[in-house]
């Protein structure tokens, strides 16, 4: 977007820039079409009846898809075994706490130094209210949930190129942008500029709406007043007794606001996918997978690296080696297989399957990049100094955002926040750094928004998902065209093998996608098994 | 007794070797990272910045292929680029960077033609690779 050289912005330029905002809405619609924002079609707990006695299912991977399948299939009477590469369950639903150690690809080791009671979710970290499947599992396993506020009116929007790099409060940008748009529309209505669209009573109703929505005065102006303070906040808040009288705050002028580009972050305020209410399990995202795991513990074998997946008309044979020591492969046999291995890795494992499934695996194997950094500070200065409780600050710095913890709010003491959540090229540059350098960079950059960082920082951890040994990236990169061509082939049962995971869902990267994919795959697998068994019996 | 002395001795030798290895790798990475700008100078408007092959390798490639270009092995693997005979074909490498291949994402949208050429030329002349036929930006443009 080019800067407007005139001192007062023209109506045309201003409306043009609003068009750029609706561009964001159009982009969001496009994302919905790709399956990024669909409501979960979870229809309640599944009941798999009539499992043929003694039928075995081998499950590859103990992330959400594998855990849910192991739980439901074993309940239905199947003989289940789970092979998991790492030494924990949950996959990308992962929580780091003090004392945890982990090693990235390349051998880079980290030890989490957080104080007791503090944690950081380096992968999945929030659950929308419309993700019914994961919420239902949390409810069934009585995992306590707490609110996760994506939008915080008092958090910041920050651009290094605007306001001399000074972060702006979300409520100021939100209120002022709305107010200025309402004023322009009202002006246009009053000058007859929209007579082709609205006349008479309709015009009057729209004027009333603009006045109410934008908090305009009687002359349809968006100017400092206590009414506007009620939207964007006061300069001096009302107090008690003989304290100073409340003082009005001053709106940001329209040109500065539009030129700042900060309005582009306002889309988070009316976003279906991240709209309120959102949740997180109290104490860490891994509480839900841990709860499911507690029901199926004896079924899971850790440290098993799958090296070959074979099948014939009678069953599957999966070769695996000890993930740490290597050695000769061991073969696990079963009647059927549910494979939840991420496509990035599955594309490298020799597998006997038809060309349609193999092509589909390769089509979405180049996983999307993301990097997260968790930082512990000596005190919760974002709450004590800046009154930011939870929510997200957005920035054009490579860290992309800072998210403040939901846990322990307004208590004295330390806190851990999300100090970076980088995507695309910024994620690659972060992934290229040593873990300690990533933390150092997140602190250095974040200090532009919170100068307290420098003094209060204690320690941090980082997860660059392209260096994750068990995923080689963050999530499957479906595009509209590749999905149209390959997605159904990925989800179809091939012989005795079915695939599941977020990659086999229309909710990419979401835990709900992994759960729905798993429930759908095991339901179809079960139907196939039951029908095969009855054919055999009758034949 | 003799066994114990041998054990101690071998531990000491191992420690010395480890220290030497640490110094060597320390010097190597220090020399490389001195040249690399901080993250905010490496990306602008969603694209990588600069045309220095070494810097671009650091920013774009080494997250997966590693600082020594030897790749890595986990549940899956990243191939080594060091002493890689596949690098004999500059076109193969250029196409892989531009369009991606299996688990490797496409970088064509994040990189200019000159940047792709710089990366390909850098990798093919470092890490034990010695291929002198360089690609130009114009060569890359043909594959867009």
Image: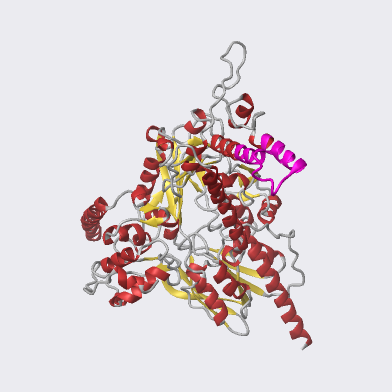
Left or right of A208? Residue B107 is: left
Residue B126: image quadrant is bottom left
Residue B32: x and y in percent read: 25, 55
Magenta segment: A182-211
Question: Residue at horizontal 77%, vertical 41%?
Answer: A201
Q: Is residue A318 above or below residue A453?
A: below
Is residue A205 covered in magenta? yes
The answer to if A43 sits in the magenta stretch is: no
Quadrant in which the C terminus of chain B is drawn: bottom left
Q: Nearer the viewer, residue A351 or A256?
A: A256
Q: Nearer the viewer, residue A140 or A249?
A: A249
The residue that appears at 46% across and 73% down in the rendered structure is A348
Q: List the single residue furthest toward the right.
A: A538
In which quadrant will I find the N terminus of chain B?
Answer: bottom left
Asked if residue A353 can be seen in this view, the reply is no
Q: Is residue B94 left or right of residue A357?
A: left
Whether A290 is drawn above or below A165: the answer is: below
The x, y position of residue A283, in whole percent, is 57, 43
Residue B6: quarter of image: bottom left
Does residue A423 show up? yes
Give the side of residue B115 with respect to residue A401, left or right.
left
**Farthest bottom residue in view:** A539
- Residue A107 vs residue B68, the one in the foreground: B68
Give me the residue at 46% from left, 50% from top: A1
């Amino acid at each position: 977007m080019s800067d407007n050289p005139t001192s007062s912005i023209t109506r045309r330029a201003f409306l043009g820039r609003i068009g750029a905002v609706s561009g964001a809405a159009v982009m969001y619609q496009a994302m919905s079409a790709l399956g990024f924002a669909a409501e979960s079609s979870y229809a309640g707990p599944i009941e798999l009846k009539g499992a043929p006695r003694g039928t075995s299912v081998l499950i590859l991977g103990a992330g959400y898809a594998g855990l849910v399948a192991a739980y439901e299939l074993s309940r239905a009477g199947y003989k289940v075994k789970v092979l998991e590469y790492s030494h924990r369950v949950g996959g990308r639903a992962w929580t780091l706490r003090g004392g945890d150690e982990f090693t990235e690809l390349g051998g880079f080791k980290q030890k989490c130094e957080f104080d007791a009671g503090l944690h950081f979710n380096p992968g999945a970290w929030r659950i929308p209210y419309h993700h019914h499947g994961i919420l239902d599992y949390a409810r069934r396993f009585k995992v306590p949930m707490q609110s996760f506020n994506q939008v915080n009116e008092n958090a910041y929007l920050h651009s290094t190129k605007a306001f001399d790099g000074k972060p702006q409060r979300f409520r100021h940008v939100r209120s002022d942008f709305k107010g200025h748009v309402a004023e322009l529309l009202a002006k246009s209505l009053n000058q007859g500029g929209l007579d082709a669209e609205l006349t008479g009573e309709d015009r009057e109703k729209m004027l009333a709406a603009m006045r109410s929505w934008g908090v305009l005065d009687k002359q349809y102006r968006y100017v400092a007043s206590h009414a506007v303070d009620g939207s964007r906040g006061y300069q001096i808040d009302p107090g008690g007794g003989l304290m100073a009288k409340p003082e009005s705050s001053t709106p940001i002028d329209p040109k500065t606001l539009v030129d700042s580009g900060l309005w582009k972050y306002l889309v988070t305020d009316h976003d279906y996918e991240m709209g309120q209410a959102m949740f997180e399990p109290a104490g860490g995202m891994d509480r839900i997978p841990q709860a499911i795991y507690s029901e199926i513990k004896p079924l899971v074998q850790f440290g098993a690296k799958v090296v070959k997946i074979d099948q014939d008309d009678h069953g599957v044979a999966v070769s695996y080696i000890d993930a740490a020591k290597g050695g000769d492969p061991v073969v696990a046999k079963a009647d059927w297989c549910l494979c939840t291995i991420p496509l990035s890795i599955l594309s490298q494992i020799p597998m006997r399957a038809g060309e349609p499934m193999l092509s589909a695996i390769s089509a979405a194997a180049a996983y999307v990049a993301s990097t997260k950094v968790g930082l512990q500070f000596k005190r919760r200065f974002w709450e004590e100094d800046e009154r930011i409780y939870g929510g997200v600050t957005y920035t054009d710095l490579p860290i992309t955002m800072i998210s403040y913890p939901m846990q322990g709010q307004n208590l004295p003491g330390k806190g851990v926040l999300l100090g970076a959540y980088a995507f695309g090229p910024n994620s690659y540059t972060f992934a290229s750094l040593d873990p300690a350098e990533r933390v150092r960079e997140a602190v250095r950059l974040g200090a532009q928004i919170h100068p307290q960082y420098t003094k209060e920082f204690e320690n941090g951890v980082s997860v660059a998902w392209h260096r994750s040994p068990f995923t080689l990236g963050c999530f499957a990169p479906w595009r509209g065209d590749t999905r149209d061509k390959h997605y159904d082939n990925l989800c179809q049962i091939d012989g005795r093998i079915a695939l599941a995971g977020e990659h086999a869902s229309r909710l990419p990267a979401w835990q709900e996608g992994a759960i729905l994919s798993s429930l759908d795959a095991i339901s179809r697998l079960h139907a196939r098994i039951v029908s095969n068994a009855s054919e055999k019996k009758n034949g | 007794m003799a066994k114990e002395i041998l054990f101690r001795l071998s531990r000491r030798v191992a420690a010395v070797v480890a220290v030497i290895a640490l110094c060597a790798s320390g010097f190597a990475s220090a020399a490389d990272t001195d040249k690399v700008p901080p993250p905010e100078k490496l990306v602008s408007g969603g694209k990588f910045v600069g045309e220095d092959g070494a810097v671009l390798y650091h920013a774009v490639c080494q997250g997966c292929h590693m600082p020594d270009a030897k790749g890595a092995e986990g549940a899956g693997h990243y191939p080594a680029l060091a002493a890689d005979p596949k690098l004999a074909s500059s076109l193969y490498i250029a196409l892989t960077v531009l369009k991606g291949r299996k688990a490797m994402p496409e970088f064509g949208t994040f990189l200019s033609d000159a940047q792709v050429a710089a990366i390909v030329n850098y990798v093919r002349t470092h890490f034990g690779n010695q291929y002198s036929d360089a690609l130009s930006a114009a060569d890359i443009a043909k594959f867009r």
